[in-house]
Every structure is written in C-alpha cells, then in structure tokens.
Image: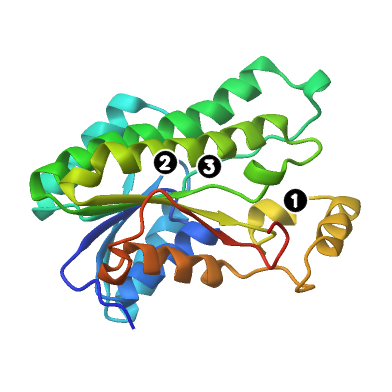
Amino acid sequence: MFSLKDKVAVVTGGSRGIGRSCAEALASLGARVVITYVRGEQEARAVVAAIEEKGGQAEAIGFDVADMKASEEAMAEVGKRLGRLDILVANAGIAIDGLLLRMKEEDFDRIMAVNVKGALACARGATKLMMKARTGRVVFLSSVVGEMGNVGQTAYVASKAAIVGVAKTLAREYAARGITVNTVAPGFIDTDMTATLGHEMKDGLMRSVPLGRTGKPEEIAAAVAFLCSDEASYITGQTLRVNGGMYV
C-alpha cells in the first residue's frame, strides 16, 4: 500500500461524502490531514475524531473557499503552522440543478465561485508552498457529467468541465517544480448530494452504468490516494475516471 507518512494534506469540503472518505484514506496512509468546512463544523469535528480514534492525525478549519483571500490565507497558515503542505485535494463543491431557461444568475455565480474559483484559490495558496519545496500533489474533484453533460445541470457541468482544463494547465505550469496536478472524475456515487436526485433521474443514471451499481465514496478516495502517492509521480495533467463504465 502507498505511504504518505509525514505528509501534510488539505482536503477541502472534507466533512462528508467523498471529502470525508478522502480525508480518512489519506490519514490511514500516514498523512496529517487538515479538513476544511464552511458550515458543517460539527460534521468536520466528527471526521477528525474518527481519524484520531484509528491512530491518525487530523484537524479541521473553517472558511469559505469562494473567498479567494480567505482560501489563500488558510493554505499559508497551514504551511506556517505545520511546516509544510504536500497535498491538496480540492473537493469542496456545490450543485444547484435546473434547466438553463430557469437558471438564476445568482445560482450560476455561486456554483462557479465555489467549484471553480474556490478550487483555484486553494490551489494558488497551496502551490506557493509546494513550489518552495519543489514537490507536491494537487488533485481536483471533477465529475463524469463534466465530460458527458447532463440534462438540468448546466451550471454544475460547466464548473466541473472547467476543472479538467484547469488541471491540464496547472500541470504544465508546475511540472518543472515537481508538482503534479490531476483530476478524479467520479461517476454516480452514493453520497448526500446524489441522494437528493429524483427517482426518475436515479433510474436513468443507473441504466447508464455498465457495472450496474452506484460507486462508493471509498472507491473515489482510493483513486485520490494513489494520485497523491510517490507511485504516481509520473502522472500529471490526467483525469482518472471512476465511474463504473458510465463514460468511457
């Protein structure tokens, strides 16, 4: 199994779902994990407690990733206090569904602010530290719909498609400093976010998955952990699709 011993990792939106699984996976491999949250402080503290109960190291900090200044300052503070920042898993994201004709401008702006600007802000803050160390791992969470599209999710799809392009660009920008930047694109995963989907949409999605089941957050976390490891040091600018064959 991969080792992340003595590494410091930040997982944004790590209080639940895929983010929680990523935090737990990285901690189990030896990383000291910093979980970020914007509203779910109680849930974030519960994740920290769960990690510590298993002998891992974790802590939680609260800020809104959509606030670029707050995001960069948070990354800098982690680096200063813990002495390093080796891994960023930019997972924080929101979805506000609706057809384009009914989409509210404020909803579109909020999705882009959290899913795109937030990811970029955290990446900018984290890579400032990684550049000095001449090593680092950045993993963005995109989505299968960012590549294949999905009815009623125009804004969300736009944000997740943008992340793929961002990762490719940053991979080129930071390669000379030993920093890899990749994307994991989950398919239909059993999380709180997908639990809100209507039965008709769920049934339609299930019919499009050749493996015939939803994915587990732990399966996404395993892919993220691999990309954060030394074993993935020659992989950058790539999208790792974990979708049960939903998009190939």
Quarter placement of the N terminus: bottom left
Under circle 2, the secondary element is helix
Res 19 visible: yes
x then y, percent, for residue 88: 31, 51
| Relative horizontal placement of residue 69, taking residue 225 as reference (left or right) | left
Q: Which class describes the residues within 10 Å of circle 2: few (<14), some (14-19), or many (20+)? A: some
What mark, if any, has residue 168 been given in the picture? 2
Q: CA distance from mark 3 to mark 1?
A: 15 Å
Under mark 3, the amino acid is Gly
Rendered image quadrant of residue 44: bottom left
Disc 3 marks which residue?
93
Instruction: Give left or right: position of 245 versus 87.
Output: right
- Vertical order, 144 against 56 (above or below): above
67 displayed left or right of 15: left
Q: Which mark is residue 196?
A: 1
Few, some or many residues within 10 Å of mark 3 (<14, 14–19, 20+)? many
Using the image as rendered, state which of residue 52 and residue 117 is in the foreground: 117
Residue lying at 63% horizontally and 42% vertically, measured from the top left: 146
Name the quadrant containing residue 122.
Answer: top left
* Marks 2,1: beta carbons within 8 A: no
Camera-side residue of 114 and 154 = 154
Could you tell me residue 184's position as x and y percent?
50, 55
Label 3 or label 1, whichever lies nearer to me, is 3
Vertical comparison of 129 with 69: above or below:
below
Residue depth check, mark 2 versus mark 3: number of the one nearer the observer: 2
Q: Is residue 156 above or below residue 225?
A: above
